[in-house]
Amino acid sequence: MKPFAVLTALLLCLAVPATAFAAKGHVHGTGTLDVAVDQGRLAIDLELPLDAATGFERAPRNAAEKAALEETARVLNDAATLFTPTAAANCRVTSVEVTVPFLEGKGAADGHADIDARYRFECATPGALKGVETSLFRHFKRLYRLQAQRSGPGGQGAARLTPKQPALSW
């Protein structure tokens, strides 16, 4: 009975959107990263203020700002470049979903805009998966912190990722 309860709890964590774990309020330069590991699957959910990626969080006013939105979407859709799971786990990207506000004409009503992204990996050797490193800080210079939470076979934990400490380990 106990293994079933643990599996159910992990699956519930995967179903909860990243915003449920986010710190209260919208803070420029700070995003959230939620990581869940379950039987060879690695799920990463990212919420990032649009300002941290583009320098603005409103509809683009010119061609350069429209290009910045498009470049942000291009970078965020390249999961294999953004996230590096433990090499020995032999993980591969299985799905990517990225929503960049204003890219398709839709924006935020409250004046704050967040990027939402979901990344899924399958790992051939899940027992070797001990962490994941991100290159988000190299791509987005206005991003200075990710509040990270993880859940998996080894339990739950939290960490603060920064440009100097871009890896989450367990």
Image (spheres, rainbow, N blue to C red):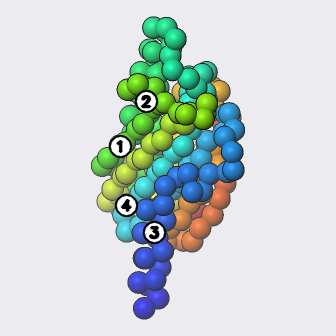
Mark 2 vs mark 1: which is more N-terminal?
1
Q: Is residue 35 visible?
A: yes
| Residue 22 or residue 167, whichever sits in front | 22
Q: Which residue is mark 4?
A: 41
Find the distance from the CA under tag 2 to the CA under tag 4.
31 Å
Percent position of residue 4, x then y: 41, 84
Mark 3 vs mark 2: which is more N-terminal?
3
Find the distance from the CA under tag 2 to the CA under tag 1.
20 Å
Find the distance from the CA under tag 4 to the CA under tag 1.
14 Å
The disc label shown at residue 106, or none:
2
Q: Is residue 154 left or right of residue 30?
A: left
Q: Which residue is mark 3?
A: 12
Find the distance from the CA under tag 4 to the CA under tag 3.
14 Å
Amino acid under label 4?
Arg
Closer to the camera: disc 2 or disc 1? 2
Determine whether the residue tagged by mark 1 lies in a helix, strand or loop: strand
- Crowding at label 3, few (<14), some or many (≥20) Cα neighbours within 10 Å? few
Mark 4 vs mark 3: which is more N-terminal?
3
Percent position of residue 112, x then y: 61, 33
- Crowding at label 2, few (<14), some or many (≥20) Cα neighbours within 10 Å? few
